[in-house]
Image (cartoon, rainbow, N blue to C red):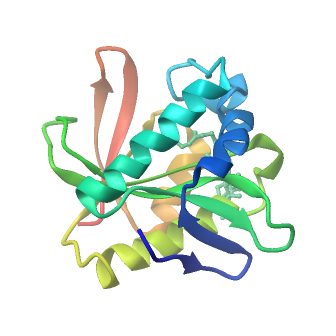
Amino acid sequence: MNFKLETERLILRPLEMGDAEGMFLLDSNPNVHTYLGNKPVKSIEESIGYIQNIQNQYKENGIGRFAVILKETGEFIGWSGIKFITEEENNHSHFYEIGYRFREEFWGKGFAYESAKAWYDYAFSGLNITVLYASAHIENAGSRKILEKIGLRLKNEYIWNNEIPCVWYASK
Ligand SMILES: CC(C)(COP(=O)(O)OP(=O)(O)OC[C@H]1O[C@@H](n2cnc3c(N)ncnc32)[C@H](O)[C@@H]1OP(=O)(O)O)[C@@H](O)C(=O)NCCC(=O)NCCS
């Protein structure tokens, strides 16, 4: 992966091993995992494994989630981006999905929307995909707001993993 995206306040670049500490700060917070199955990580090794997994996706799929860096301070504030999903979900497989996750101290400042808008534009102008999907916990009002604001449309409700009530969005 050798490209990055830039928005007014953010740099979106490939994840690096040096992001492990930031990833651990992000994923060890139970509040971040409220709508993600409530399984925050317990050790930095898990975060390192997570980064390795995404780096493998860069090689295999040519895309994966990117680190979000705050221009003003150079800090890792979360991740955002497009993932190629091969597993089946809501009767789809082998599709591109947009997602994001931010450290709690950076919520409510418009960063998730700012990054998601950049990825939405890149999906169609850079990756040249025909349709972009997303899913969220049905009660995840913040995430749903962002998906709708970038222009995705609500398609249906479904249960993910026999457990989590979700909503499914698509660009068309
Ligand atoms: C969901 C999440 C990404 C939102 O990030 P954020 O940076 O706070 O979102 P933004 O500031 O860009 O907000 C965009 C819009 O959503 C609204 N919003 C954000 N959080 C909200 C919430 N909890 N309830 C209602 N609206 C919310 C904002 O008010 C804003 O609306 P506006 O455009 O009318 O002003 C963040 O809370 C997070 O990382 N949560 C944990 C991980 C997660 O749930 N990821 C999504 C999985 S599907």
**How many numbered discs?**
0
- The N terminus - image quarter: bottom left
Of 37 and 70, which appears nearest the observer? 70
Residue lying at the far front of the rendered structure: 17
Judge whether residue 95 can be spotted in this image.
yes
**What's the residue at 83%, 45% (across, down)?**
105
Q: Is residue 133 visible?
A: no
Question: Residue 70 location in percent, x, y?
Answer: 76, 66
Q: Residue at x 69, y 72 (%)?
A: 10
Give the residue at x 29% y 14%. Answer: 162
Residue plotted at (38% across, 32% down):
166
Residue 118 locus on image (x, y percent):
51, 75
Left or right of 27: which side holds 77? right
Residue 38: quadrant of the picture? top right
Quadrant for the C terminus in the image: bottom left
Rendered image quadrant of residue 23: top right
In percent of width and height, residue 2 lies at 44, 74
- The picture places residue 65, in percent across and down from the top left corner, at 46, 55
7 above or below 119? below
